[in-house]
Image (cartoon, helix red, strand yellow):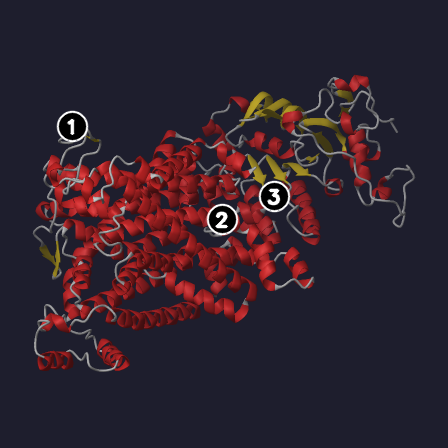
Amino acid sequence: MFDMLARRALQSALVVLVMSVLAFAGIHLVGDPVYLLVPPDAPQAEIARATRQMGLDLPLHQQYGRFLWNAVHGDLGNSFIFNRPALALIFERMPATLELAVFALLLSAAIGIPFGMWSGMHPGSAVQKIAMGFSILGVSVPVFWLGLILIMLFSVSLGWLPSGGRGPTTSLFGIEVSFLGWDGLRFMLLPACTLALHNIALVMRITEASTREVAGQEYVRFARAKGVGPLRLVWRHIAPNVMIPVVTVLGLEFAHLIAFSLVTETIFAWPGMGKLIIDSLLQLDRPVVVAYLMVVLLLYVLINFVVDVLYLLLDPRLRARSA
Amino acid sequence: MALLEVRGLVTEFHTAAGVARALDGVSFALERGKVLGIVGESGSGKSVTALSLMNLLDGPGRIGAGEIVLAGEDLRRASEQRWRALRGDRIAMVFQDPMMSLNPVLRIGDQLAETVALHYRKDRAAIREQVAEALRRVGIAAPRERMRAYPHELSGGMRQRVAIANAIINRPDLIIADEPTTALDVTIQAQILYEMKALVRESGTALIWITHDIGVVKDLADELCVMYAGSVIEHGPVAEVLAHPRHPYTRGLIDSLPDAGAMGGIDGMGGTAGTRRRLYSIPGATPPLLALPPGCAFSPRCGRAAALCATRPPAVAEGARAHRCFYPLERA
Amino acid sequence: MLARRFLRRHAGVAAAAFLLLLVLLAALAPLVAPQDPYDLGQVWIMENERPPLSRSDDGRRLFLLGTDGAGRDMASAILYGLRISLAIGIGSALVALLLGIVVGLAAAYYGGRIDAALMRIVDVQLSLPTILVALVLLAVLGQGVDKTLMALVLVQWATFARNVRGAAMVERGKDYIEAAVGQGLPAWRIMLRHVLPNCWAPLIVTTTNQMASAITLEATMSFLGIGLPQTEPSLGLLISNGFDYVLAHQYWISVFPGVALVLLVVSVSVIGDQLRIVLNPKLDA
């Protein structure tokens, strides 16, 4: 089992390396950031000096080499705009993004799983039809439009919730979080729900499909044949089997939520990592963009790895196969 | 009094395409400690009989009429709670494919322990001992270590033994085995049959053994029930039915066996191994339940069918035997 | 017989009919739309920000869904936007499908190291967040219809490749393929005429799902300001343009294009869902 995990770890490291090359090379084709420091009509000498200062005069592979060397030491360069370490900027913004992602994940589990399981066990019921209808809508409504509608409804028309920004935060173990007080929570509700909708729908569909399959299995009938009642049947026999694919999907979706939050953050002006990268992209702040890509990528790889381990733990059949 | 009496059992499936009568008046009785073999092709209603006896029919299936009496108790009047108390304790079932019937994420020891704990209040150590005992009785060595295994870690034969252990663990009055050896290879099949015979004899449990293969039941069963398209078309002590079948379908089944010659084959001369003849199969196919022919369901395939067969033959009892045919084969 | 089974599913038929309607309206937009919103001669700034069901100043035209900040009739803008959204969404999915088929079939047929290498690339691509890949690609390639198409294709092909390779591998192992190989048929012929036709069932479902997500992804990119330029306003861009007006209670500029987008994506999704049920007999109750 361990050598399989080791192989996966190695593969993940390779992915990160490859992506670092691509990200670095790709970003370099986006505009010429020297004009961030000097106005376009500056004298040649100025431009040349700025170019040298930013290290932009070196050949590309040397620039990458420097980048890689620094990266391994935890230095992903300074933001051209803020003149602070790019990594620091990203870590500052990370709690805000993670807040939304975690909230969305919990919401999708809390709503998606029960409704999905009920629908799977009672095909053709009213609940199932409504749930499945809702889930199609949920995966089809674009996140940005949903945010718009929610803002329209709850901010503009009803005036219940704010339409953007992050509320007052409290410090939890040194990290700034906003969900601990109602003031902070108010600001978090709309963006988190917007982000969550697609996920709720997805979890509902996957849980429904998984439950439908499990409920039809012979071992469910076997359990009934020895006298297992309906509650115990669901809890002890059906749910553990349903959860195997569902948990893996939840895990993978968490990574997706972190990346996808950039759209939500843009709509609600939520100061997370995502908003940072959009701004940085449009302003050609290369180090920040590259740093963001690397961080998100690493998170992705890490989460995928954890999901693999979880999967192994949940399904005893896999443990044997990889032993 | 017989342990189990089934009279006129009717089971119907309400589908979008119509109501299919899977069981059309099935009747039989079973004494304690005896083995009843139910034989028939796919679609004859054998599995439906098993599920009906356990009240485990799927959604569209429902028992329409008839009586099921177990040790004097009218089961059709029983509540679902009563059924749950009976299942696994007084009536137990063994399914066909043990890979599918054991829950893959639970250890076999836990699954067996659950069967006990559902019906009896015992402490953990006592239950564990009972589980080990049951595993020992089905011939699994080192039961205390094996208990911790997951189903996929065992071979097919072992898994089916576990399923049997699950059935016997509470010493039920009746075990229903639905094609329990069909999914196993032939050598294991023989072992399991042998062990089942011993178990039944030693514990006095009644056993219903459902199969499509007569060869399997002829040594195990005391009585034989032959089913076709939802009806019992012949019934009686095993040796007599096989030696002198009254219903043409039974005859056809016997003749389809590769070693039919050894049982007094077509030519009626107890042939020896080495008698060369072509493999016989009954012409035609089982009719679909939604489109049964009128009268005797076997008539389209029967060489002896005549005008009278367009009405349903009633069950004719002859001592311990019974058959449903207007033109039965000659008595011995 | 597949068509007949599909036709029995009411939801699928309704969705397909609706989609057909949308496609027709979009294709015939120049004829059907009351106004060409990008012909400056037909647009008056004085008529801007009119609510739905209001009339033009000369009383002759009805703005069914209102006008936007520049005086363009929303209904017409939506029809033209629908065109672009449909074209890019469906177009990119189809090109990605083609690319995926080539790669998937090649991997399945040649097997061994070629398969391993190709699938490694596919795996890497699929383990990356789509939105980030699209973002970076578009940032690098710049704005434009062709570049957006390219980015969408690059984001989608891997899913198709994996699906095709999976189905093709299953077929590859079957005896009739061995027979064909034994007969000396050339590789491309075997793959195209024998393997591929048997893989199309799950592929159809994947294609519809991908179309839906391509449309949504393009809308998202346009909304963020990367992707399509202002001259080719898809529904996403319309929504983006109307965003600021929401706070001023002029909801129609953003909401109606959004409704159109949602209806489009829902109908494609429903068709895909119904196809999936029809193709899998166990689900067809």
Element assignment for label 3: loop
Residue B259 location (% of width, % of height): 82, 45
Element assignment for label 1: loop
Is residue B121 in view from this perspective?
Answer: no
Q: Disc 1 residue type?
A: Gly
Image mark for residue C59: 1
In the rendered image, the quadrant that contains the N terminus of chain C is: top right
Q: Nearer the viewer, mark 3 or mark 2?
A: 2
Which circle's residue, 1 or 2, is located before the other in the chain?
Answer: 1
Tell me the residue at 62%/31% (across/down): B49
Is residue A17 in view from this perspective?
Answer: yes
Q: Disc 2 residue type?
A: Pro
Position of residue B261 in the picture relative to residue B118 (left or right): right
Q: CA distance from mark 1 to mark 2?
A: 53 Å
Q: CA distance from mark 3 to mark 2?
A: 31 Å
Q: Are marks 3 and 2 on the same chain?
A: no
Q: Nearer the viewer, mark 3 or mark 1?
A: 1
Q: Where is mark 2, residue-wise?
A: C202
Q: Where is mark 3, residue-wise?
A: B96
